[in-house]
Amino acid sequence: MNDLKPDEEKDWVEDAKTEISEMAKDGPDHPSTKPVVIGAVIGALVGVIAFDGAWFLGLIVGAAIALYMRIKK
């Protein structure tokens, strides 16, 4: 069911931790900041429109998807 080997999964988690810490350190100058913020805004809008005001959940999911897409590249 899970195609990732344990080492590959740990690498993804480590990549995510590294990317988030670098985004926090560099702020808006980091290349991943803008796509993640845009993903968060789109997710918040979808949460408000589709799920009757669940903007915070949409924000979190949108940012997570955008971060995943950045790390996956």
Image (cartoon, grey):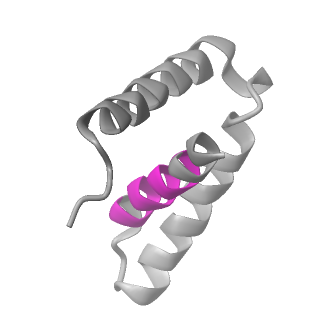
Percent position of residue 2, x then y: 24, 59
Any magenta on residue 61? yes
Residue 56 pos. (x, y %): 37, 59
Pick the front one: 26 or 16? 16
Residue at position x 32%, y 49% in the image: 4
- State the residue lying farthest toward the left: 1
Residue 37 in the figure: left or right of residue 65: right
Q: Is residue 46 left or right of residue 12?
A: right
What is the chief secondary structure element of the magenta stretch?
helix
Nearest to the observer: residue 52 or residue 38: 38
Look at the picture and state if 2 lies above or below 34: below
Measuring 48% from the left and 85% from the top, which residue is drawn there? 49
Instruction: Give the quarter of the image for residue 25.
Output: top right
Asked if residue 6 is among those painted magenta in the image, a careful observer would answer no
Residue 60 in percent (x, y) is at 40, 54
Residue 41 picture location, percent across and down? 60, 60
At horizontal 42% and vertical 35% (from top left) the residue drawn is 12
Residue at 63% in and 45% down: 70
Most foreground residue, 69 or 40: 69
What's the magenta region?
Answer: 57-67
